[in-house]
Image (cartoon, rainbow, N blue to C red):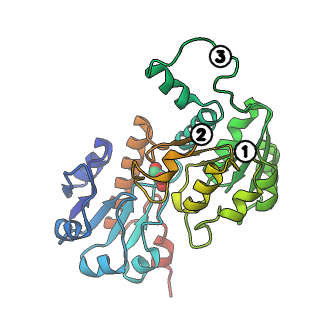
């Protein structure tokens, strides 16, 4: 068996693949392979270990007919056309759970950093602008006691909610699929329809996957519902937010701030208007980037791939059941 890994990943994952006896080809560049490069590099491969930077669609699969499994080292899978994979008998796997806590931690890093101008203030010190204690300098918003609105109450949304109790916050959430009463009770979280959540929250944090239904879920209309001193946090996918509408809201100071680990487009060019807006922190899609978590993601992605190529049920597959349903 020959497998292709589309970038250098933590060794834990590579070891799993080598121990399985596979020939492992690792894309050596610091940037993702282009479509053409990937087609060449993955010729005759049986499996792909991909990242969210690779688009896996019908065209690619048709050009690489030897591929039997695609294992994404991510919980999100908007880069993969799962239907096209299933139609061609290709197993698709992802890496949920292992990154939940790390992503929730980072969401809180952004909440606190935006609320209290942490990056701006630290930059000022680096630039030699700390002249005195300023009674009016870097005034932020209180997080303790504020209302936290969570859009998408899956694993990561719930982990974010769990951390809010120390801040004595009112937690409200919205979710299209679930309203779990025992979790609501445990986390003291109240369900609200999206519009009401936007109108009542001081901090709105996004934790939905990117699907046709959630693309530009937060647009001009939704931003206009938010309080002028509210902030928007996004560690999910950039395209869940209408970037132009967000730029307009921030520029006109109709929104107090934004903390974005994901953007549309990604990467965000240094001259993008979003970076000229007041009180915006943009980080380069690093919410899951802790040493331990990335190692676990690599390991799970590799274990998924090995199982799929052996014809065994992978630990976390999106379409194994569908592919193996009898009749
Ligand atoms: C994911 O897993 O989908 C994140 O965006 C990267 O960790």
Up/down of 277 relative to 118, above or below: below
Asked if disc 3 and disc 1 are in contact, CB closer than 8 Å, the reply is no
Mark sitting earlier along the chain (2/1):
1
Q: CA distance from mark 2 to mark 1?
A: 11 Å
Question: In the visual, does 110 lie left or right of 284?
Answer: right
Give the image quarter of residue 209: bottom right
Residue labelled 1 has its Cβ within 8 Å of some atom of ligand 1: no
Mark 2 vs 3, N-terminal side: 3
Quadrant showing the N terminus: bottom left
Q: CA gap, disc 3 to disc 1?
A: 24 Å
* N-term-proximal mark, 3 vs 1: 3
Q: Is residue 34 visible?
A: yes
Residue 324 showing in the rendered view? no
Q: Which residue is mark 2?
A: 279
- To which quarter of the image does residue 208 belong? bottom right
Q: Decide which of 243, 91 is in the foreground and name it.
A: 243
- Point out residue 277 in the picture as x, y percentages from the top left corner: 56, 46
* Labels 2, 1: front one: 2
Camera-nearest residue between 168 and 158: 168
**What whole-number distance in Å separates the C-alpha atoms at marks 2 and 3?**
19 Å
Secondary structure under the numbered disc 3 in the rendered image:
loop
For residue 2, what is the image quadrant?
Answer: bottom left
Residue 327 x/y as whole percent: 50, 88
Q: Is the residue under label 1 in contact with that under label 2 (CB below 8 Å)?
A: no
Q: Secondary structure at mark 2?
A: loop
Image coordinates of residue 289 in percent, x first then y, are 43, 41
Q: Nearer the viewer, residue 196 or 228?
A: 228
Q: 251 left or right of 1? A: right
The residue indicated by pointer 1 is 230
The residue at the point 55 percent across, 64 percent down is: 210
Residue named by callout 3:
134
């Amino acid at each position: 068996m020959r497998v292709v890994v589309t970038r250098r990943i933590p060794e834990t994952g590579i070891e799993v693949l080598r121990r399985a006896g596979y020939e492992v080809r690792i894309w050596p560049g610091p940037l993702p392979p282009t479509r053409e490069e990937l087609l060449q590099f993955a010729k005759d491969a049986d499996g792909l270990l991909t990242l969210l930077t690779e688009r896996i669609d019908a065209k690619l699969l048709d050009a690489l007919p030897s591929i039997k499994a695609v294992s994404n080292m991510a919980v999100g899978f908007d880069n993969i056309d799962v239907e096209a994979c299933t139609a061609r008998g290709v197993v698709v796997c992802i890496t949920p759970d292992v990154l939940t806590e790390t992503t929730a931690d980072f969401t809180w890093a952004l909440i606190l950093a935006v609320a209290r101008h942490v990056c701006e203030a630290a930059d000022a010190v680096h630039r030699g602008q700390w002249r005195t204690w300023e009674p009016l300098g870097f005034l932020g918003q209180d997080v303790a006691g504020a209302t936290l609105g969570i859009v998408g109450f899956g694993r990561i949304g719930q982990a974010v909610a769990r951390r809010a109790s120390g801040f004595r916050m009112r937690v409200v959430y919205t979710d299209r699929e679930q309203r779990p009463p025992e979790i609501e009770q445990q986390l003291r979280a109240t369900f609200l329809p999206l519009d009401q959540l936007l109108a009542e929250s001081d901090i709105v944090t996004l934790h939905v996957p990117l699907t046709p239904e959630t693309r530009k879920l937060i647009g001009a209309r939704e931003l206009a519902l938010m309080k002028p001193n509210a902030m928007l946090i996004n560690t999910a996918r950039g395209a869940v937010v209408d970037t132009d509408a967000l730029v307009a809201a921030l520029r006109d100071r109709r929104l107090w701030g934004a903390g974005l680990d994901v953007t549309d487009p990604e990467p965000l060019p240094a001259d993008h208007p979003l970076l000229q807006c007041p009180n915006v922190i943009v980080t380069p899609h690093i919410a899951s980037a802790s040493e331990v978590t990335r190692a676990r993601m690599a390991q799970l992605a590799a274990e998924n791939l090995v199982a799929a190529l052996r014809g065994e049920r992978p630990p976390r597959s999106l379409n194994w059941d569908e592919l193996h349903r009898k009749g």
